[in-house]
Amino acid sequence: MNKAILSSDEIPRQWYNLAADLPTPMQPPLGPDGNPVSPEMLAPIFPMALIEQEVSPKQWIDIPEGILDILLKWRPTSLHRAFAFEKELGTPARIYYKNESLSPPGSHKPNTAVAQAWYNKQAGTKRLTTETGAGQWGSALAFACAQLGLECKVYMVRISFEQKPYRKIMMKAWGADCIASPSTETKAGRDILDKSPDTPGSLGIAISEAVEAAVTDESGSTKYSLGSVLNHVMLHQTIIGLETKKQLALFDEKTPDVVIGCAGGGSNFAGLAFPFVHDKINGADIEIIPTEPASCPSLTQGPFVYDLGDASGMTPLLPMYSLGHGFVPPPIHAGGLRYHGMAPLVSAAAVEGLVTPRAIHQLECFEAAVTFARTEGIIVAPETSHAVAGVVQEAKRAKEEGKEKVIVFNLSGHGLMDLKGYEAYFAGELQDYSLPKEIIEENLKEIADFPKPAVAKTGRW
Amino acid sequence: MNKAILSSDEIPRQWYNLAADLPTPMQPPLGPDGNPVSPEMLAPIFPMALIEQEVSPKQWIDIPEGILDILLKWRPTSLHRAFAFEKELGTPARIYYKNESLSPPGSHKPNTAVAQAWYNKQAGTKRLTTETGAGQWGSALAFACAQLGLECKVYMVRISFEQKPYRKIMMKAWGADCIASPSTETKAGRDILDKSPDTPGSLGIAISEAVEAAVTDESGSTKYSLGSVLNHVMLHQTIIGLETKKQLALFDEKTPDVVIGCAGGGSNFAGLAFPFVHDKINGADIEIIPTEPASCPSLTQGPFVYDLGDASGMTPLLPMYSLGHGFVPPPIHAGGLRYHGMAPLVSAAAVEGLVTPRAIHQLECFEAAVTFARTEGIIVAPETSHAVAGVVQEAKRAKEEGKEKVIVFNLSGHGLMDLKGYEAYFAGELQDYSLPKEIIEENLKEIADFPKPAVAKTGRW
């Protein structure tokens, strides 16, 4: 048997909320005044159902039927045993991958896009705004809005907008309007363009524009949607790991030894990993590894601090590992991993020692991805290649140790829209880049006066 | 329930061979001397197991375990009920689609690519050559060769090679070598380049190069592989329709009323349709419709003749509907449907009146595809849009007639590598084009002296 499938009846009917299960409670987001942000303060941006999920004390939250109906178009996704990849690596490890590339937009992102669009629809929202970098999130929200009959407006970082013209055509096929950011449609965009007419844009600017477009719509029927970082996004992704557990049982596997996902904002990692973090909290012996780019190493090089979620201060202060909100990550090809911070929930799990982050260089990632493509047949997204490289490291370790480990990773998306990265790799145009400590220290000066999170029990800070 | 899935155990274990089931036996391919081609004459090009399938009198042919093992990486594919699409069309019809876009290369093509690569591997072949137009077939064979450890060389029509740079990166990720055709590596290529250094290339030229590269390899370990047209290719694709029948039963559907697939060379149409043609031969009342582009209407405008499979005479004469092998189809965006002829088996079924072809204009196809994307969520390939447009026509007819028809179509591939076509459609740059009768007549003059097939019972010729 090379893959385990579940019937529609077997799709999980509840999401798992790690926030309600952590040994030490999460520290709250803070407003500009240093006081905790109240749910009401978020109401102009998100519908109340999502705000409630953001702060929910419940460990399990029911998935509404209306959301399941749409998820069932491609879920449950299959869990594959990577026989050919194992053989190529000559490892005694048994390697499994959860295939999230099977969704129509090609990644795990629709798991939360559909849920967010559905709750917005229920609350009377007519239109969602968002930002996108590489385009995976914008595509997923465009898809979800088409499913729910919502309008969708995507602010896409200009350099990506120009370099990846087909992402905007994808969004248009689903009826969404995608424009380059900074744009002249928002005050935030115009201010930037006045100062720097030739700016390539950034995710921070695009977030500012999307939030502004939502909160300044006087009809109140426009809301904003975020594809990672926040607790409710992590929550919606846990369906990945919950399915995976049922499928490992079909392979007669018990608790895996190693669980791996790539981490930018944190959502695909959280989706696979959190249900296993639950087991670890309850005593299971699992190594859970978020892999991040060495060029943007928030979890492995950043401190655990309060920092802004965006570049320009439209968001509350979040307790997270961060390289400083002013940090502009170098243009590696894994655009989805170019984020200065890390989801507060993933950060909290790292502080507790429940997950053990690892940074990997991009040449090693592409090499692993090519080996994977030629054995298992799937060309993974550049983001996902960081998970594959982590698996190769662990498979080699199992070989050295002579142990029959079980390794599970999240194949978060395919790379068919990002073949430019592979092209550059094959042409020998890519280089590795380690972020100098001085740059991190320089960026952190900007947040020196921000409130500090309480030092956690087991964390480095 | 919005989709039916089958377990790995339920994958079909035999292919269905329509050639052995037709009321009137197929007419044989002919050599340049007008005599039937013997299996031995094809031995330098194909391994004997495939040649045997090409002429097999058996109605059912076992699928080897080694092939099933690879197909099971993504098969059985899901059959979906298109609830949202039905609702948008306001039709009483129940519409189902077979999702062949779920394979790693994104189309139905690997069903035969894997089988061909496997039989070649068994026969000691080290290297396969092929041609590709839009790139779907070349990608599929590259994928299959990586699975079997074969080298793969793809001659890609130069205009496509230049316009679609990412297709060749896909092939390279799977380890295949893809070069622009005409190339300087073959005599056929050099001859063309001497005469027309700036030629955009054609599928006919690319076939000539790929066949030459196979037959001139003195080691004898290089063979040629074709992605459509031939009987053994149709055979390997029947797994699509065989799975579909099991899945319709899971939806409690009996015989469908209408079965639709787009048709260029004929392979995805045959794959879904032939198992239903079997039922029709045995008395079932089913309308089976191959949909083709109005700009390249071999089945609806061409005569049933003996014609060459390629432009330059490297292949035998095949009994098929054809617009003449010298016909260069206009550059519509459904590159996979730009073929002058039609598979002999599909042609024979049309001659017998078992299938009822229909030509559709491309603007209608893209309009249908956009409606489908916004309801069902999948952005289909431009080729597949011809099937979707046929479904829209039939769904409207069911509405007019007030009938609860069951319509099944083959979603042969996704369009994520072909968004340029959607871009041109959204920009209003596409036009419809009907092939003038004079052009067809002019092209047919070239084959006026070829042998004629016996006139079939119910055909137009």
Image (cartoon, coloured by chain):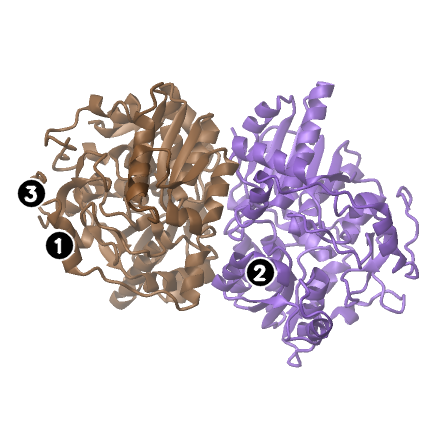
Chain colours: A purple, B brown
Q: Secondary structure at mark 1?
A: helix
Mark closest to the chain's N terminus, 3 or 1: 1
Q: Is residue B168 above or below residue B216?
A: below
Q: Which mark is residue A162?
A: 2
Q: Chain of mark 3?
A: B
Please check whether the numbered discs 3 and 2 fall on a single chain.
no
What percent of the width, then of the height, locates residue A351? 85, 45
In the picture, the disc for residue B441 is 1
**Quick one: SS at disc 2?**
helix
Seen at 42% across and 24% down, the residue is: B66
Q: Residue at x 45, y 26 (%)?
A: B148
Q: Is residue B201 left or right of residue B174?
A: left
Label drawn at residue B455: 3
Q: The numbered mark 1 sits on a residue in which chain? A: B
A97 with respect to B428 (left or right): right
Name the residue type under label 2.
Glu
Residue B352 horizontal/vertical position (percent)? 14, 44
Frontmost residue, B424 versus A193: A193
